Each structure stands twice: as C-alpha cells, then as structure tokens.
Amino acid sequence: MIYFDNVSKLYNDGRSAALQEVTFQVAPREFVSVVGHSGAGKTTLLKMIIAEDKPSHGQVFFESLDIHRIPKSKLPNYRRKIGTVFQDFKLLQNKTAYENVAFAMEANGRSDAEIAENVPQALSLVDLEDKVWNFPHELSGGEKQRVAIARAIVNQPDIIIADEPTGNLDPIATYEVVQILRKINDLGTTVIMTTHNKGVIDEIERRVITMDGGRIVRDDATGKYVL
Amino acid sequence: MFTGLRRVVRAGFVGFWRSAYVSLAAIFILTVALFVIGATIFLQQLLDTSLQAIQNRVDINVYFVPTAPEEDIARLKLAVEALPEVESVVYTTKEEALALYRERNRDDEIAMQALEELDENPLGGNLAIQANETSQYEQVARFLDEQRAQEQPQTPVIDEINFARNKDSIDMLTSIINAVEQASLVVMSILLIAAVLITFNTIRLAIYTAREEISIMRLVGAGNMFIRGPFMLQGIMYGFISGVLTMLIFYPVLVWLGPMTESFFEFNLYTYYIQNFGYLFGVLVGTGVVLGFVSSTLAVARYLRT
C-alpha cells in the first residue's frame, strides 16, 4: 500500500543526503518498525509519506497515488487517510483531550452524531475515559501520547505513521503505547513506526527496517534490533 | 457547509475566550488605535468649525457717501451678488447705520451732542460682503475698485472700501488657515498610519503564538478555511469590542471636554458626539472590524502558505 521507488533526498546542492536510493514497500495490515541512529533518515522517510517533504529523486506511492503529485488543495484530503503520532505529541494546547480528538473529525467534515459516538470510543480504546475533559498540560506524557493516538485513529485511517512515539516516555508508558499500537494493528490498520528503543522492537517481533546514512541496510521479516 | 461554519464560529469564540490574555492585549492595542482615529475625527471637526467661524468674521465693507442714490447702491449690490466668489452681501441703509451708531455710543455724551447739532444724517449706508474663501477677497476688492473708477466725479457713490486697510490681516489669516489645514492633514495621516501598523503587528504577534497550533491542524488534515476561519472571526471580535469600548471611553472624556470646547471654540464636542453617535459608532466599529479582520487574515496566511 506504500511504495518507495528509488527515493533520494539531498540537501546543500546534493552534498549531503537524508535518503539515498531507498526502495521498499509496505503491505496492508503490516506493522513495520524503522530503526537507526539519529540522522539515519527515519523521520525524513515518514515526512515523505505525509507529504511534508518532497523527494529530490524517485517517487512515493500511496496505493496507486503518486503522493508528491497531489495538488496542494487536495493535500488535506489525503492527510485525512493517514493517522500521525509524534514524539512531541503535537496536541492543540488550548483544547481538551476530547476536543483534540474531535478536531480531527471536524476537520474531516464528519457529522456531530459520528463525533459524539466515535470520540469516546477512540478515547476508551486508549484507556482515557476518565481524562476526557483535561487539557494537555494536565496530562502525563504517556496520557498525552495516548490522546494523540486516539486522534490518529478516530477517522479510521488506512495507515498510522508514528515517529518515535515512545521517545519521550518512561518504560511503563512506552509499554502501554506499544500495546495500543499493536492492538490497532490487530484491528486491521497498517502501522509504520520509527524508534531507537531496542526493547520495543524485540517485544513487537514484526518486520524491522534498519537504516544507516540514508540507506536501508537491513529489512527483516521478524526482526530484532541490530545496530 | 453549515456544520463547518458553525464549527468555525464556535472554535472562534472558544479560542477567543481560552487565549484571554492574547485577546485582551489585542483589544487594548486596537482600542488605543481606534481612540487615536476617533480623536482625529473630533480634532478635524473642531478645526473645521473654528476656521469656519474665523472666516465668517472676515468681510469687506463698502461705505457709501450719505448722498448716494438708492438705485445706484441697489445696482452695485446686485452686481456684487452676481460675482461667483461672493457668498453673501448685507446692506445696511443710512438710517440703520445711524441707529446702530446711536446704539453703540449711547453712553458717549459728546458724540450724542454732536449728532444733535446736525440736522441731517451724516452717515452713509454700507455693504458687508463675504466671500467663500478668504483668498477671494482680493478679486472682490478689485471689482469694487473698478466700479468706483467708473463713477462720475461730480456724483460719487462709494465713499470708502476698507479692503486695503484689512488686506494685511486677511492675507495673514489666509496663510495661517492654509498652514493649519496642511499641518493637521500631515499629523493626522501619520497618526492613522501608526495606528494601523501597530494594530497589524499586534495581531500578527497574537497569531504568531498560535503558529504551532496551525501546523498541527494542517497535519491532522484540516483545510485552510477551517484553520483560518476562527482566527478571522477573532479578528472581527477584537475590532468590534474595541470599537464599542472606544465609543464608551469617549463618552466621559467628551462630557468633561464639551463645555471647554464650547467656551473656547464655540463648538461643543459632546453635542457633536451625541448628534452624530450613529455615524461615529459606524466609523469606529467599522474601522476596528476591518482592521482586525484584514490583520488576522494576512497574519494567518503566512502560516498556511507552505
């Protein structure tokens, strides 16, 4: 469903590269972890998928759609098919947990009835029924990330992109977040996650893509963290 | 469509309330700016009326000899009235002039006795001529001089034209009026531009604090109008509240200033405020709303461009 065709991203007139000749594909319902040191190109890879960054060479496809040929006016539509989760949560600070999740649905043009039904469901899936009306600054790191996950899944996207979702979390919160992502994957959503947490990778026991210097150096079906 | 509008409006109000400090700052600055604009309107009004009042006091007087025939005077009056520069001509007959003289010198025994000695009225009638602009008196005076030159020497009609006597003061007044009008235009333009720039920058700062939010909204897949809408609405709210606030602030200020302007400029600003309340309200609130709306639209556009 995601297909990278010989993608490179160059900076400084080609003297430094964030991605070099990256080719791989992700099938529906897969759970792919992308690992590598800082600067290996993991985040650039994800930015390509959500059309936040353009490749210098090569193409990225979402199903049969060339992502970087989508006109600007259609980008919001495209982004609604993808749920995103970030290391720094990226919650709207002056909205409550409920409103943060509801915002993604409002932006999507969903009806009030759907919002009233789906938002509590999404929040209960991440075990936050009791923090629905709290603002982000009243939540712990793990809780914030769970709100972000609820927001990412509430529109029932085809794919979840998670950039270091556990990077700012303690071990227990990390465990919870990974369990939630696995649960979402089990329910049928494709997940692409970057991480450099060895424990997380070893626990998931799914496909692992290892990157170094902008290149894919390993791609194991049920990988371990090897660097 | 309707749902989207409702959500934008709700988000606008909620955002206004939740970022109360930012909203307060924006309203405060906008109120100051609108106050400056309002004060400019009042000052302009004050200047206009006082300049008008001064201009109205300037006139040319044509004094006729006591023996001047009425028909000659009437002919001259008609001719003067026909001039395009002339606004009004007031004729004072010799009898009225005498009555006026008696009235003015009621307490002056000597003048009264001198008047009694004479069997006939020693005073002639006169015309008081007002031009539209002080600068036009020169032409009116030239016309009168020509008329006088055509008179038969044995039957004079015009005794004296007082323009030459008043010329210097009229010239000076003309240049002062021009200078004041120009200076006020420059000062007011500078004040207006400053007010607009300060407002624009304040709102830009207010939205700068929300740039992170805007980028998150885009990531979640919100369309441009859905992101921009609440900010535009907030800009309109800033403008509306500031406009109303400015009108409210002017009330006590003018209650206090009104009597002073009345006695000094013969123009009561408070009365002006009350009589033109609708107009002033429209101008200030309208300016505020437009300023707020345009500023916030431009400011958000910056973060939506990429």
Image: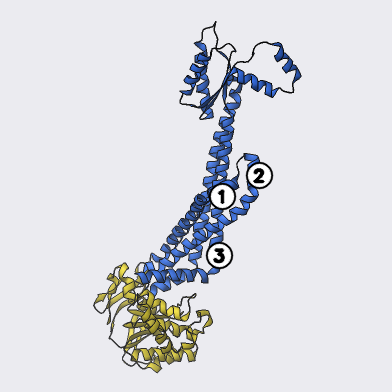
Chain colours: A yellow, B blue
Q: In this view, does A158 lie above or below B50?
A: below
**Position of B144 compared to A224: left or right?**
right
Specify the amino acid type for callout 3. Leu
What numbered label is drawn on residue B274? 1
In the rendered structure, the residue with mark 2 lies on which chain? B
Residue at 50% in and 50% down: B279
Q: Residue at horizontal 52%, vertical 49%? A: B192
Residue B152 is situated, as x and y percent measured from the top left of the image, at 51, 7
Q: What element carries label 3?
A: helix
Q: Nearer the viewer, residue B216 or A59?
A: B216
Chain for numbered disc 1: B
Q: What element carries label 1?
A: helix
Label whose residue precedes the other's in the sequence (3 or 1): 3
The residues bearing labels 3 and 1 have C-alpha atoms spaced at a distance of 28 Å
Residue occupying the far right of the picture: B109
Q: Identify the disc placed on residue B227.
A: none
State which mark lies toward you, 1 or 2: 1
Q: Name the residue under label 3.
A: B24
Secondary structure of the residue carrying numbered label 2: helix
Q: Residue furthest left?
A: A64
Classify B150 as above or below B298: above
Q: Label 2 vs label 3: CA separation? A: 33 Å
Which one is earlier in the sequence, the residue at label 2 or at label 3?
A: 3
Asked whether residue B67 is in view, the answer is yes
The answer for how far apart the CA atoms under marks 1 and 2 are is: 16 Å
Q: Tell me which amino acid carries mark 1.
A: Ile
Residue B290: give x, y in percent of width and height: 45, 56
Residue B252 image offset from top left, x and y in percent: 62, 54
- Any part of residue A15 in sight: no
The N terminus of chain B, quarter of image: bottom left
